[in-house]
Image (cartoon, coloured by chain):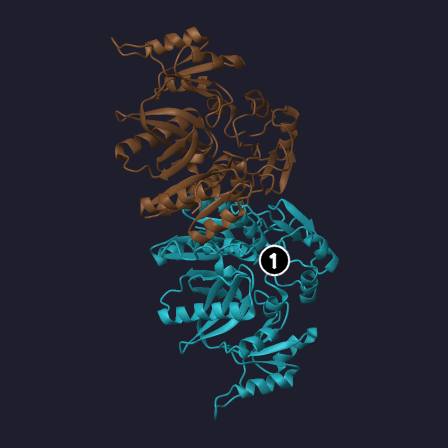
Chain colours: A cyan, B brown
Amino acid sequence: MVGGGQLARMTHEAGIPLGIRFKLLSDTPQESAAQVVGDVVIGDYRDLETLRAFAQGCDVITFDHEHVPTEHLRALEADGIPVRPGPDALVHAQDKGVMRAKLDEIGVPCPRHRLVRDVADVVAFAAEGLSEGAQGDGFPVVLKTVRGGYDGKGVWVVRSAAEAADPFRAGVPVLAEEKVDFVRELAANVVRSPHGQAVAYPVVESQQVDGVCDTVIAPAPGIAEELALQAGELALRIAKELGVVGHLAVELFETRDGRILVNELAMRPHNSGHWTQDGAITSQFANHVRAVLDLPLGDPRPRAKWTVMANVLGGDFPDMYSAYLHCMARDPQLKIHMYGKDVKPGRKVGHVNTYGDDLDDVLERARHAAGYLRGTITE
Amino acid sequence: MVGGGQLARMTHEAGIPLGIRFKLLSDTPQESAAQVVGDVVIGDYRDLETLRAFAQGCDVITFDHEHVPTEHLRALEADGIPVRPGPDALVHAQDKGVMRAKLDEIGVPCPRHRLVRDVADVVAFAAEGLSEGAQGDGFPVVLKTVRGGYDGKGVWVVRSAAEAADPFRAGVPVLAEEKVDFVRELAANVVRSPHGQAVAYPVVESQQVDGVCDTVIAPAPGIAEELALQAGELALRIAKELGVVGHLAVELFETRDGRILVNELAMRPHNSGHWTQDGAITSQFANHVRAVLDLPLGDPRPRAKWTVMANVLGGDFPDMYSAYLHCMARDPQLKIHMYGKDVKPGRKVGHVNTYGDDLDDVLERARHAAGYLRGTITE
């Protein structure tokens, strides 16, 4: 696995019972996964020769993140190393322009969008969004760099032409999108194997705070059965049409008028699937491993009526130890997942999962633990 | 953790989400745990200086097996290294003579037993077991070396004075025990922390084949509520009286007349607790880690009505890969736990867990998978 973050850490954890010999390419020995994996190579994934040397002896290469240059992945494939997901699929998770063009082509509903070259393009794009006869300039508009963004980085909500200049300063292509009037965000997680076997997890609700995932509720409360089915089928269709192998997370907007629109794609285990570690028969990490190795996939169904995942962000205090003790003592059913990272304000350093029959209780327990660990709750 | 076997492998797996930095002392780099742990020291646990060097920088030392010499553990403690379970507790799992004497002292029901020095002692011991006025010589009798046995090794069922000579040939002390007329074997698993917090898992039925654990059913089917309670309380009492820290497995005989007698003790995660990985809210491995680090313990209650664990033994074919594929494809809910060991006939190389509401179905699925992986079932 290329990349030493928490996704690699948890993928290794899930691979141990499957008997998988896991090899890691990590930037430094201090990274989350590098702390717990036996076979670690330290090196820079942006360097092709480093990747080539790492790939020696691997049955298959997969990723903790989408940042490996597409041309390097093609070079590995040319060397005969299976890369899963392959570069032709992964490019849709690497480049939002390519993703939008492909989703348009296969008829997947997306927010209105266009690649823009300058502020004038943005102004024109905004104006085109006005309903016939409506007043105003069509702002706000969402601008995104097509590559390199995550957790709200590389994304701007601009309210005027003046604000629209910023995203162009980096000199990378920019995508304009309508600011969707959504009631909530959903995520459809599916896993697909090279055989073409695929499984769909229940559609979840994902709640963001400041552009960062805060809480995930599985399944999405009160979702219309037809909409849940539609979201699952959409994700399975995207996985098939794009040739995805492994885990695919499809982030969705549920609009005020009851439609779903695709927001983002990720082709790796995803924050919206962390609940599966304790809430599903087979976790997203186990199924990602099974898929990339072309093993039969495991049952994705939930084990509990409700499962809630809450991210643990770093707070003002670098030492979480006493809070960690408190949370375990308060709730013996709490499932803690720490990433071994130094605590910095706002940094994702872990998550907690809770499950049960009573959603209010399950939510309260998860939020209390995450808040207590961050230091925003002290009772 | 000292010892590179599968118990260390699964303890590391359980420690990852808790954020634990796990360090391993392993005989060779090929061992089960050494394949998946990041921080591995290769060395011989029988050598005190190796142990001392390994212990540098560890917050606490615990064990994958009971074979570390008691005097080495005392030396580590004298160096200021916390050893959990400590030598005064662990000796009861290392030496069956010490264990029986202590259990007698605290009034725990055991099979009739005595340390024996020679065949004449065995003959006398056997004769004493005859009911008043009964005919015969009192054989069979069980003989055990007090140290070093496991999985039926170091245990003899002798049917005559002539057969009783064998166990004395190694020159180690031998314990004679009555051959208990039991209806089944049970196991009571508990975990205790240095704080004195303790949790009890449901009492399970353990089925042995040729002296090796074959299947574990959780909870023990049809067990009288009072007997289950009595077994759990007995295990908690033993943990407390012996000062156990970490996981304690108490192997029990359920006698034909409805009593329980203690067969063996193990002070580490135990085969009779593997079902907890998929069948309990907190696994025995997670609770062992939490106990030895004096963290609050997790909820030991079951998540399913029935959970069955079946051991996967090696069969005649060294390559299990196609069987592994078959089992995953046949049963997407099957939980496979492989140890990364080379397959040898009769060697424990993994286990499977199944769970559900219908015991017959859960048992069939586990036994089928274990049999198919071993090669004794081919359909």
Give how far across and how far down residue B352 sits, in percent.
45, 43
Q: Is residue A377 visible?
A: no
Indicate the position of residue B20 as horizontal and vertical percent values.
55, 43
Where B361 sits versus A148, above or below?
above
Q: Nearer the viewer, residue A356 or A105?
A: A105
The answer to whether residue A379 shows anywhere in this view is yes
- How many labels sit on residues? 1
Residue at 44%, 69% in the rendered image: A233
Farthest front residue in view: B379
Residue toward you, A112 or B95:
B95
Figure quadrant of the N terminus of chain B: top right
The extreme top residue here reads B120
Residue A184 placement (x, y as % from top left):
44, 70
Determine whether the residue tagged by mark 1 lies in a helix, strand or loop.
loop
Q: Residue furthest right?
A: A49
Q: Position of residue A55 (x, y in %)?
A: 68, 54
At a point 70% along the width and 75% down the height, the residue shown is: A171
A180 or A45, which lies in front?
A: A45
In which quadrant of the rendered view does residue A307 lie? bottom left
Name the amino acid type tagged 1: Thr
In the rendered image, the vertical position of residue B322 relative to residue A96, given as above or below: above
Q: Chain of mark 1?
A: A
Residue that badge 1 annotates: A62
Instruction: State left or right for residue A343 relative to residue A185.
Output: right
Viewer-closest of B73 and A37: A37
